[in-house]
Image (cartoon, rainbow, N blue to C red):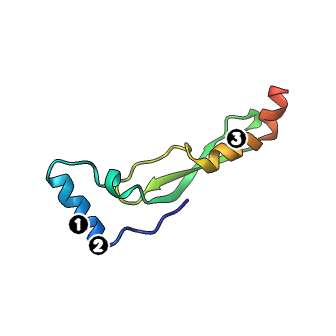
Amino acid sequence: MERTMPSALDRLIAEASVLAGCEHPCAVLGHVWIFSSGAACGCPGGACSLPVYECQACGDFDYGNNDESAEIIAECEYRMEATA
């Protein structure tokens, strides 16, 4: 999930487009997600933890709303028992 940092030229182009009134740099370059912390899965007993990522460029968080978390929730044995 983690991406490499955009090049210096990519950053300059993104910053110039923002100054010109265009989109946020992350809308141009995409977020640079790095692992930040964990969030509760929501299952009984709190046995599962979801990864939470922060954008290294803008500081935005995904609050555990990512593909990796979706897989963890789908495989959570407590959720499977509750829905069976």
**Circle nearer the N terminus (1, 3):** 1
Element on which disc 3 rests:
helix
Residue depicted at x 32% and y 55%: 28
Q: Which residue is mark 3?
A: 73
Element on which disc 1 rests:
helix
Q: Is residue 67 left or right of residue 12?
A: right
Q: Is residue 77 left or right of residue 11?
A: right
Tell me the amino acid under the disc marked 3.
Answer: Ile
Q: Which residue is mark 1?
A: 12
Residue 16 percent across, percent down from the top left: 18, 60
Residue depicted at x 56% and y 53%: 37
Q: Which residue is mark 2?
A: 8
| Separation of residues labelled 1 and 2 (CA atoms) | 6 Å
Tell me the amino acid under the disc marked 2.
Answer: Ala
Give the residue at the far top of this rendering.
83
| Separation of residues labelled 3 and 2 (CA atoms) | 37 Å
Q: Are marks 1 and 2 in contact (CB under 8 Å)?
A: yes
